[in-house]
Image (tube, helix red, strand yellow):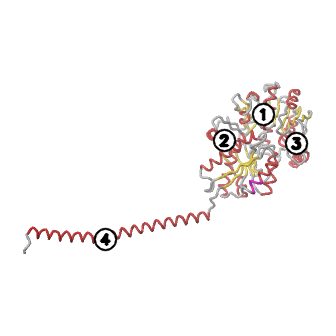
C-alpha cells in the first residue's frame, strides 16, 4: 500500500537526520581522539616537568650547600660583666636577623649559637672551644674584657679559627686570628688625655681602674703620655674585678683633689664607683670624671645624677646625627623596645657582623681562611661614619668622639675627629717588644691569669712622675 505523502516526507526527513547524525558522530570521533591525545601529551609533559624539576633540585642540592651557616656569639650572660655584654648579644642578633631577612648568605640561612662566658676568662676559653669543635661555628663574635679575649686567643689560634672582637681595648696585641673592630688606644685613650690637657686645663690626673689586664695597660699608656706632656699622675688605684668595695679609691680621690679622674672601672663595679663618687661630693665641675667603659646602656641602669656632667670617650654615641645612625637606632628600638638605648659596643657589635657578612659574600665562602683574608679589605658606612679594616694590623679605622653626659642619659658631643683615625695598636712611647713584655709580666705576676688575684684589696699607688720606657 502506498505511503501517504506526509508519511513519505517524514521518512525522508528522518533518513536525512540519521545521515547527518552519523556524519556528526564520525566528525566528532576524531576530535575526541585528538583531545584525548592532547590531554595525554599535556599530562606527560607535566609529569616530565615535575621529574626534571625534582632532578634539578636534587642535583642543585648536591652541587650547592644549602645547610645553615652557623656563627658563634660569646659574651657574658651572667656575672659582673652581664650588665654590659647582654646588649652586645642583642645587637649581633639584630644584624644576623637583618641578614636573614635579605635572603641569608650565599643562598643559605644564618643560625647562631649563644654561649655564656660568665665573666670568667677560663669559661670563655672553654665556650670558645665548644663553639668551634662541637657547634661548628665558622666565626665567633665575642668578649668584652681583655681578660676574656686573652683567654680565647690561644683557642682560636690553635684551631686556626676567627674571633671578631668588638670592644675598645688597650692594644698591645696583634693576632692573625682576631679582627679587632673596637677602638685601639690611639682611637680612645690618648685623644681623651690630650683633650683633658688642652680643653679642661688638667695638669693633675688620677687613674682608677678594675684590677685586670686592660686598666693596667691603659694606665701605663696614659702614664707615658702624661710624662711627655709634663703633667702629673697624682695616684693610680685598682678595684678588684667585680667588687663593689670602692671606698678606698673614692677616699683617695677626695684626698688628692685631682684636676680630672680617668676611669677604666668596668661592669657592676663602675656603677658602684660612680654613685660613691657623687655621694662623696666629687663634683664634675671641680673634678670631672672621664670614663672609658661607661656608655648609654650602663647609664640607663644607674641613678643618672651620679654621672651627669662627666665625660666619656668612644667612637660612637647614640646622639650622632647621621641618617645611618637614625636607621640603626630605630631598628634596634623596634626590635627590643622603644625605651632602649644604644651605645658604642652595641654599634660596634652590629657593624662587625655586617663586615663579616660582606667578607663572606666577597670570598663566596664561609671557610675561615678566605673570610679572614677578605675581612682585611672591608669597609662600610656604619652608623658612626665610614669605618674600614686596616689590612696590616687587622684593627679598624674609626672616628673618635668625646661626649658630656646629659640629664636625659645621652651624650652631648663636645669633640669629634674630622675623619676616621688609623689604628695604632702599639703606642710609640715604647717598643713593641717592651709592650709585649709588660703585658706578659702582668700575667706571670698574677699567677698565670689575666685578672689580679681576688684576694688583692683595692690598691692605691703613691704619686709618681712617669718617664717613658725605652
Sequence order check: which comes first, mark 2 or mark 1? 1
Q: Tell me where residue 199 appears, x and y as whole percent.
A: 78, 30
- In the image shown, does 466 or 344 lie closer to the viewer? 344
Residue 107 located left or right of residue 208: left
User: Which residue is under mark 2?
Assistant: 383
Drawn side of residue 385 relative to residue 204, left or right: left
Determine whether 50 is above or below 420 in the image.
below
Q: Is residue 62 above or below residue 413?
A: below
Q: Which disc is residue 271 wearing?
A: 1
Residue for badge 4: 29
> Within the magenta stretch, is there residue 259?
no
What quarter of the picture does the N terminus occupy? bottom left
For the C terminus, which image quadrant?
top right
> Where is residue 277 shown, x and y percent of the image?
81, 28
Residue indicated by mark 3? 452
Taking the spot 68% from the left edge, 43% from the top edge, the residue there is 90
Q: Is residue 109 above or below residue 235?
A: below
Query: Which one is nearer the viewer's eye here, 358 or 197?
Result: 358
Q: Is residue 431 left or right of residue 316?
A: right
Give how far across and how far down residue 340 sits, in percent: 66, 36
How far is disc 3 from disc 4 in space, using C-alphas? 98 Å
Magenta: main secondary structure: helix
Give the residues in magenta. Answer: 129-133
Q: Are marks 2 and 1 in contact (CB under 8 Å)?
A: no
Amino acid at each position: 500500500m502506498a505511503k501517504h505523502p506526509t508519511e513519505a516526507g517524514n521518512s525522508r526527513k528522518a533518513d536525512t537526520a540519521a545521515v547527518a547524525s552519523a556524519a556528526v558522530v564520525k566528525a566528532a570521533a576524531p576530535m575526541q581522539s585528538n583531545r584525548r591525545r592532547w590531554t595525554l601529551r599535556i599530562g606527560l609533559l607535566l609529569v616530565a616537568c615535575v621529574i626534571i624539576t625534582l632532578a634539578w633540585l636534587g642535583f642543585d642540592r648536591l652541587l650547592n650547600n644549602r645547610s645553615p651557616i652557623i656563627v658563634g656569639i660569646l659574651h657574658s650572660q651572667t656575672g659582673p660583666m652581664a650588665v654590659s655584654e647582654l646588649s652586645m648579644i642583642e645587637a649581633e642578633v639584630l644584624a644576623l636577623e637583618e641578614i636573614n631577612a635579605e635572603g641569608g648568605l650565599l643562598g643559605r640561612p644564618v643560625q647562631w649559637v649563644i654561649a655564656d662566658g660568665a665573666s670568667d676568662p677560663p669559661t670563655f676559653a672553654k665556650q670558645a672551644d665548644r663553639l668551634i669543635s662541637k657547634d661548628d661555628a665558622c666565626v665567633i663574635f665575642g668578649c668584652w674584657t681583655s681578660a676574656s679575649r686573652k683567654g680565647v686567643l690561644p683557642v682560636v689560634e690553635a684551631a686556626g679559627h676567627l674571633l671578631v672582637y668588638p670592644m675598645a681595648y688597650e692594644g698591645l696585641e696583634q693576632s692573625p686570628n682576631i679582627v679587632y673592630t673596637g677602638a685601639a688606644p690611639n682611637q680612645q685613650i690618648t685623644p681623651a688625655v690630650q683633650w683633658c690637657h688642652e680643653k679642661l686645663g688638667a695638669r693633675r690626673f688620677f687613674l682608677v681602674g678594675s684590677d685586670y689586664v686592660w686598666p693596667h695597660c691603659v694606665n701605663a699608656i696614659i702614664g707615658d703620655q702624661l710624662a711627655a706632656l709634663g703633667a702629673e699622675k697624682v695616684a693610680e688605684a685598682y678595684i678588684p674585678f667585680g667588687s663593689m668595695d670602692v671606698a678606698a679609691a673614692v677616699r683617695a680621690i677626695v684626698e688628692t683633689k685631682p684636676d680630672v679622674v680617668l676611669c677604666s672601672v668596668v661592669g657592676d663595679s663602675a656603677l658602684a664607683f660612680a654613685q660613691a663618687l657623687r655621694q662623696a661630693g666629687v663634683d664634675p665641675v671641680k673634678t670631672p670624671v672621664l670614663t672609658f667603659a661607661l656608655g648609654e646602656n650602663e647609664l640607663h641602669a644607674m641613678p643618672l645624677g651620679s654621672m651627669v656632667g662627666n665625660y666619656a670617650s668612644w667612637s660612637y654615641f647614640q646622639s650622632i646625627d647621621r641618617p645611618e645612625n637614625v636607621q640603626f637606632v630605630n631598628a634596634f628600638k623596634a626590635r627590643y623596645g622603644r625605651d632602649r638605648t644604644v651605645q658604642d659596643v652595641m654599634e660596634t657589635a652590629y657593624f662587625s657582623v655586617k663586615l663579616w657578612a660582606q667578607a663572606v659574600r666577597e670570598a663566596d665562602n664561609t671557610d675561615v681562611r678566605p673570610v679572614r683574608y677578605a675581612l682585611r679589605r672591608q669597609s662600610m658606612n656604619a652608623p658612626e661614619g665610614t669605618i674600614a679594616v686596616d689590612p696590616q694590623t687587622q684593627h679598624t679605622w674609626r672616628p673618635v668622639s668625646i661626649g658630656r653626659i646629659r640629664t636625659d642619659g645621652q651624650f652631648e658631643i663636645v669633640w669629634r675627629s674630622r675623619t676616621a683615625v688609623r689604628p695604632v695598636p702599639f703606642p710609640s712611647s715604647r717598643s713593641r717588644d717592651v709592650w709585649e713584655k709588660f703585658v706578659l709580666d702582668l700575667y706571670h705576676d698574677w699567677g698565670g691569669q689575666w685578672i689580679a688575684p681576688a684576694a688583692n684589696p683595692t690598691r692605691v699607688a703613691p704619686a709618681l712622675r712617669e718617664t717613658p720606657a725605652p
